[in-house]
Amino acid sequence: MIKSSPMVTKTSAVSIKNLTVRFPISKSMLGKAEYLTAVRDVSLEIPRGSFFGLVGESGSGKTTLGRATLKAAPISQGAITFRDREDRAFALAELGSKEERSFRHRAQLIFQDPYAALSPRMTVRDIIAEPLEVMKLTKSRAETDELVREIAAKCRLNVEHLRRFPHAFSGGQRQRISIARALVTNPSYIVADESVAALDVSIQADILNLLKSLQCDLGLTFLFISHDLSVVAHTCDHVAVMYLGSLVEVARPRELFASPQHPYTQALLSAIPSLDPDHKTKPMALRGEIPSPVNLPSGCKFHTRCPSATERCRFEEPVLQGSGGHKVACHHVDAALQAV
Amino acid sequence: MTLLRVQDLQIKFSTPEGEITAVDHVSFEVNPGEVLGLVGESGSGKSVTARALMQLNASNTTYGENSKLLLETPGESVDILALKSERQRRKVRGDLVSMIFQEPMASFAPALTIGSQMCEQLKLHRGLRRPEAKDLSIQLLSRVGISDAARRFDQYAFELSGGMRQRAMIAMALSTKPSLLIADEPTTALDVTIQAQVIDLMKEIARDFGMGIIFITHDLGVIAQTADRVAVMYLGKIVESGPVREVLHNPAHPYTRGLINALPKLEDLEAQLTPVPGDIPSPLERPAGCVFHTRCPQFSKGTCEHAIPPQHLVGNEHFSACHLHEEALASTLASAEHNQGVPA
């Protein structure tokens, strides 16, 4: 369901310009450092109040991109600007320590595994209250308790249970605790990294519905990172597909799923197993495996596996372009899209 | 001929907090050349069932008195639960039954080459000598679609990508020519494009080698594309079973329907996702009566929380364990009687 939340304005909550993230891995014998390029020259606008989906397979750089927007991954090149509810801009690459503190409670992360993310030695109340205490956002314990109870109720946690320890809770309830912890500092931007991947199917829908309703009530902007295309199609209002550190296609989900333009998106969609046994999934065959991010292929990153790759793809890198919010980085669809 | 007959399987674990019933009176069959899908969420007992077939459950496990795991191959017939010595069990593991695990990285020894691990089991189970074992291993590695198999044979697990590791795992499981292959979430750790390839490979293998496959997963889409028959498990019970087409097109049990409604579907992006209400109960607080009654939208007070529903035949070889079918049955009978009572 695509719902527009009340806080939508024209500016972007996060704007990413030509972002590159590199990690040093080792020094070769000649003393020259080798780098792993996790994200390469990515530009993206995340509109305020959107539920922005980022999909890709393992090693595509989706987590690194998400973390970079929280200043939790190094920005090697390019710039990321975050804007809070009052439209104050934070340039992430050059935050002062005071600014950084104020940025931290405005942007938060929800983790994948609710079993690993919660300390077994803390009560649920302490887990949720910790960000407030660490950032010194409240003046008294009573004020902290008040905020904790308020957010716990919003996340549909039983307030009676706040004194218990996380081991007493099921996966779905734990994920609600993680969400409450992320939201307690009243952030405006949330990165949800595979936040439903570890949950059972019957619980997953419940958490997705909760995230959507919180987004509306609290006017949040979400970056929803997932490998599951059907989940993204159902929850998000924008989708970006990543492959080997680059964005290959950005569109509204309905358009992306109805007419995927990039060969990689087409391959991904064709590989989703259909629920109907009579409708045999015919996955588009991709050659080989995802190349190593240490030695990125030249030209189009996908040319080594693309069924329609030509000479040009091997040398010239395609630009992400298109009209009407549907952008594709492929030499073979430029003409078609521009005609539309 | 039936390859595997699981009869009245009951598995309990004794833990410091009390006895946990992991699998409760479960019966099913697998035929040669058939893929049986075992679907369920965490705690449904699907992996414990599979591990019972390999006798891999921990030492605090007790099996029910009337439980039987009968494996019938042309040469012999064994009840896996009646095996007494470790030596007899070793004959079942690897010889008759092979298993593929979820995380291929964790299943290979990191310090041995793929080849030496493949040869070791061929030596143990089939008495092959090293050169023969090597030839066969390389042959199988290419059979599962690994290019340059001779080179891969000498590599270590960490040098292979995720998809390739899972293929090597499959090759290894096949090399002893087992009659039954158990695949426990074999595609869960893989990317979708690789998953699709592994599914195709498994189907091909069931057909070519004529072995029975038990395919365990939580993903109904994967089941729809792989299995011939499916059994849906919840808290240690099979709540619904039947031909995959029947079960997915006409789900009879409220839990199966709930699972299908909770799944996001690409055909209909506007559809609301309906979660199954509530949480999976803790294994220590197993509900009485129908295990699903605490979350069932069609819960009927007075029946569901007391009586364990029997398996009802609801279609062609399609069974569902729900009290609802009794009412449906009763009302059909009643209307039939009523019709008979009215003179023509």
Image (cartoon, coloured by chain):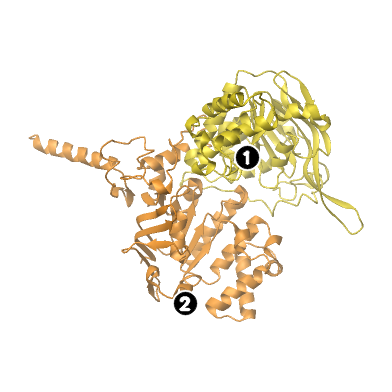
Chain colours: A yellow, B orange
**In the rendered image, which quarter contains the N terminus of chain B?**
bottom left
Residue A42 placement, left or right of B6: right
Residue hosting label 1: A111
- Separation (CA) of disc 2 from disc 1: 46 Å
In the rendered view of the protein, which quadrant contains the C terminus of chain B? top left
Residue A53 can be seen, yes or no = no
Which secondary structure lies at badge 1? Answer: loop
Q: Where is residue B299 in the image (x, y as percent from the top left)?
A: 32, 36
User: Does B109 sit above or below residue B239?
Assistant: below
Which mark identifies residue B87? 2
Taking depth in this image into account, of B81 and A165 the one nearest to the observer is A165
Query: Which residue is painted at 50% across and 32% down in the image?
Result: A157
Do discs 2 and 1 share a chain? Answer: no
Q: What residue type is labelled 1?
A: Phe
The kind of residue tagged 2 is Arg
Q: Which chain carries label 2?
A: B
Foreground residue among A315 and B91: B91
Q: How crowded is mark 2: few (under 14 residues within 10 Å), some or many (20 or more)?
A: few
Residue at (44%, 64%) from the top-left corner?
Answer: B53
Label disc, if present, on residue A17 of the rendered structure: none
Q: Residue at x 32, y 45 (%)?
A: B288
Q: Residues within 10 Å of mark 1 (few under 14, many from 20)?
A: many
